[in-house]
Image (cartoon, rainbow, N blue to C red):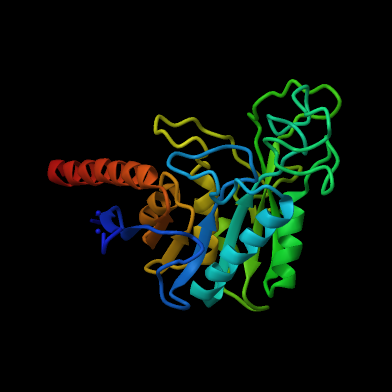
Amino acid sequence: MSKVVIPSKKSSTLFGNGQTTIIQASAFHIPLKDESVQCIVTSPPYFNLRKYLGNSPDAFGQEKTIAEYIQHSVDVLRECRRVLGNDGVAFWNIGDSYSGSSKGNGGKNAPKKGCGTKAGATHAEVPTKNLCLIPNRIAIAAQEDGWWVRDQIIWYKPNTMPESVEDRCTRSYEVILMLTKQRKYYFDSKAIEEPAVCAQQDLSKSRHKRNVWFIPTRPHEDAHIAMFPEEIPRLCIKAASKKGQTVLDPFAGSGTTGIVANELGRNAVLVEISSEYVKLMKERFKALEDEDASLKKAA
């Protein structure tokens, strides 16, 4: 079972099988002790693709150049590495964008002089209509900064949004970087085994999870516009942590990582800089807390 807390900007909530702490703070300065979490699951703001409630014009994700965005990503990842246990794992879900389009897709709204607008990349960095290769750049920068890049998981979206662009294929996936602090780390592959695919279709057999994850996007009534589906943190948390351990999301948004962590018997720390999203999380967790209490009372 669980309960919502704030030292200036901190709040805790209890429901399900773990405790979640909500902290209004910057991901550049995570207010946690060194090596205090076992697993990190997050989806940071993508490079100049959308604005979030309460964010300032110079917020993370609104950088003027790709280079600045990559450097800020490395800065946050350093903080993540500091608070992550030595045998811990970080999962960094990141999407890509195209240079020069006000919609991030290189379409008809691309500026005439070849300079990025919504996608942010200047012509000197990436010519208009080029893929910015953000996940690749972050992976290389993280590796050079001391991380082990253990995997690039492909989140395939079978119900991806259609695109009007006619000179390339419609994008239907995002990347989840799997990063570790050292060569050996905790990872329970049996916890996320999937049904084996064979000629006899013997569903009693299983195999190691492949690194292409077929997970549909799911609309939600809450206001956060970039919620990832619960199945993503569920797989990450089950594989990279044990019950009773702590999971961190430094860009918590609407709190999906914390909800899943609670359901799986893990504790969670949700760091979010926007007061609007902190309020949204507290309301969401309070509703779950009330629902949990009602079920217990009925039983």
Q: Going by the picture, which residue comes out furthest to the left?
A: 297
Residue at 71% from the left image edge and 49% from the top image edge: 65
Q: Look at the picture and state if 59 lies above or below 73.
A: above
Report the side of 298 relative to 71 (left or right): left
- Where residue 101 sits, quadrant-wise, is top right
Q: Which of the image's four quarters has the C terminus?
A: top left
Q: Where residue 128 appears, x then y in whole percent?
A: 83, 36
Report the side of 289 relative to 114 (left or right): left
The residue nearer to you, when weighing 100 against 12, is 100
Q: Which of the image's four quarters has the N terminus?
A: bottom left
The residue nearer to you, when weighing 53 against 57, is 57
Residue at 60% from the left image edge and 40% from the top image edge: 215
Q: Look at the picture and state if 167 lies above or below 188.
A: above
Residue at 59% from the left image edge and 35% from the top image edge: 216
Residue at 47% from the left image edge and 66% from the top image edge: 29
Q: Look at the picture and state if 246 lies above or below 153.
A: below
